[in-house]
Amino acid sequence: MVTSDSPSTLFTPMQLGPLTLGHRVVMAPMTRQRAEQPSAVPGDLPLEYYGQRASDGGLIISEAIAVSRLGHGGYGSPGLWNDDQVAGWKRITDAVHAKGGVIYAQLWHTGRRSHVTTSFQTPVGPSLDPSFWANPANTVSTEQGYAPVSPHRALELDEIPAVVEEFGLAARNAAAAGFDGVELHAAYGFLLDQFLQDGSNRRTDRYGGSLDNRIRLLMEVVDAVSAVRGADRVAVRISPSSTFNDIHDSDPHALFAHVVAALDGVGLAYLHVIEPRVSGFTLVDADAGAVASQELRKSFTGTMIAAGGFEPDTAAAAISAGNGADLIAFARHFVSNPDLPDRIARGLPLSPYDRDTFYTPLQAHGYVDYLPFDAADAAVTA
């Protein structure tokens, strides 16, 4: 029950395509690197983790799930390209549904931000860019720890349809695994974002140059995935201001206005916008407002989720403003508060998170050992 001093705007129902959510506190997609390797199958640890964080009527967006071995860009990350992975995810979606929750699969191809020990072959991108792998800041998780990304190559024109089909296959696998829908990861400098932005896309064919050409791959993937699930169970995540993974564009405002306008005509379940207060793993400006969602609302009439460093009060304020996001996604607070919606609703304090355990492959500590408030309080007073 919502108390009088809780941010009650977060606890009103919301329609998400054909589904009705009971509240607007969304669990953001978070890379946690706990899938079994090299199989990329989510095992018992992710099963416990997602089950802990499911809530009645609440939306969970899964961590990034690779659509293919080539698109698998980080040790400990899961996949959705084979039957074993489908079976692993089916256990998880069943656990979320048993608690009345909704869960979307975030489909991911890392593109050039990868390593040969995880992709098992030379990574690919829209264009060849040796400066990307020469930058020591561009690292990726491997079995031996973080290492510089591997040199990549440009996708050939005749290879692009196969990439689109990989997303389509992953969407079919997501349906078989029981996911309620899929979110396309077109943010943070991964493959779909690499094609969008002219800092990484220097192609001269039909996938490069003009805005229409640079958004072509994203729109083809949206069409392919919508043909599998229906557009009202498909979503897209974008990061209009992020420079993570060396991503940049000469005119990001024009680019993302164009992207969002194109997506507005599709009938998506939602658009997921990362606010400029965060970039990748880093909180840049905790006091920055929800400016990206407000700006893009001018071009998008459908349901919108905003993410990026929100606290319960700032999340409630963003919803109350009524000129941007309809739902708010939390990441860091969901790490250390498996019962986050309940804590917010009851006005309870939030447990601190330990950033050192965010990305520790296959370790239970910092992953499934955070307690809900009532259990933690009972342990302290016992």
Image: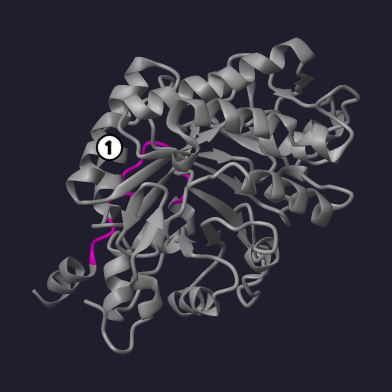
* 59 lies above or below 69: below
Q: Residues within 10 Å of mark 1 (few under 14, many from 20)?
A: many
Q: Quadrant of the N terminus?
A: bottom left
Which corner quadrant holds the C terminus? bottom left
**In the rendered image of this protein, does residue 7 appear above or below residue 249?**
below
Q: Is residue 366 visible?
A: no
Residue 196 x %, y %? 76, 39
Total numbered badges shown on the rendered structure: 1
Q: Secondary structure at mark 1?
A: helix
Q: What's the residue type where badge 1 is placed?
A: Ile
The x, y position of residue 379, in whole percent, is 14, 69
Taking the spot 87% from the left edge, 26% from the top edge, the residue there is 203
Residue at point 47%, 24% (across, down): 170
Q: Main secondary structure of the magenta part?
A: loop
**Segment tinted magenta in the rendering:** 358-372
Tell me where residue 33 appears, x and y as whole percent.
45, 38
Front residue of this view, candidates 134 and 312: 312
Q: Nearer the viewer, residue 108 or 351?
A: 108
Residue displayed at 48% across by 54% down: 356
Query: Which residue reaches farthest left?
Result: 382
Q: Visible in this render: residue 90?
A: yes
Q: Position of residue 68 (x, y in %)?
A: 53, 20
* Residue to which mark 1 is pinned: 92
